[in-house]
Image (tube, helix red, strand yellow):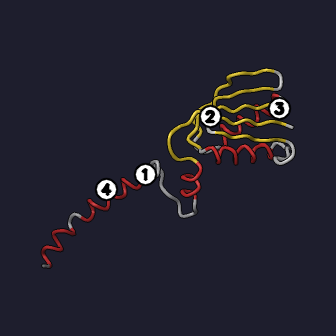
Amino acid sequence: MVTGVLRKMRFLPIILSGLLLVACAANGGEKSSSRGEGKHTSRMSQGMVTAFTITLRRFKSDDAIYLVSRLADGSLGYQSHNLLKSASGLRIYEYRSSIKAFALEEQLNKFIEERGFDADRDVEIYVQGTTVIVDRL
């Protein structure tokens, strides 16, 4: 009986290392942190890269460029962005990221307030699927 248990225990390190690899792969290859960063990362950006279309209307060019550059620098899951169209008071970007739509909206609100706008009075944000429209009021 004891020898049977000992024989099975020799496989324990192999089983545990396999479970660790599966857990790491499920977490996108990132280690979880005891400070809660792993939860924040998986909640905000987990999964496939999505191409969002972000339309900024009635913003000055420098404000629009600031918002998109902050998304590129400060958002989780960022891959790339590209200016699709630019006209007076209108900028349309393709923004590729693994961030989820609700988290992208949260990030936009944060960066809008950083720029000095009141997110509840000065802008409206519409999110539907992969389409994001930010209107300056």
Q: Which residue is mark 1?
A: 26
Task: Find disc 3 in the rendering and name its residue.
Answer: 59
Mark sitting earlier along the chain (2/4):
4
Q: Secondary structure at mark 2?
A: strand
Q: CA distance from mark 2 to mark 4?
A: 36 Å
Depth check, mark 3 against mark 4: the one in front is: 3
Pair 2/3: label in front: 2
Please tell me which residue lies in front, 49 or 131. Answer: 131
Which is nearer the N-term, disc 3 or disc 1? 1
Tell me the element at label 1.
Answer: helix
The answer for how far apart the CA atoms under marks 3 and 4 are is 51 Å
What residue is disc 2 on? 52
For image coordinates 41% across by 49% down, the residue present is: 25
Q: Nearer the viewer, residue 86 or 66?
A: 86
Give how far across and how far down residue 101 sits, in percent: 63, 43
Which amino acid type corresponds to the residue marked 2 in the rendered image? Phe
Q: Which residue is mark 4?
A: 18
Q: Eyeballing the image, is 3 above or below 121?
A: below
The answer to whether mark 3 and mark 4 are in CB contact below 8 A is no
Give the percent coordinates (x, y) of residue 108. 72, 43
Q: Are marks 2 and 4 in contact (CB under 8 Å)?
A: no
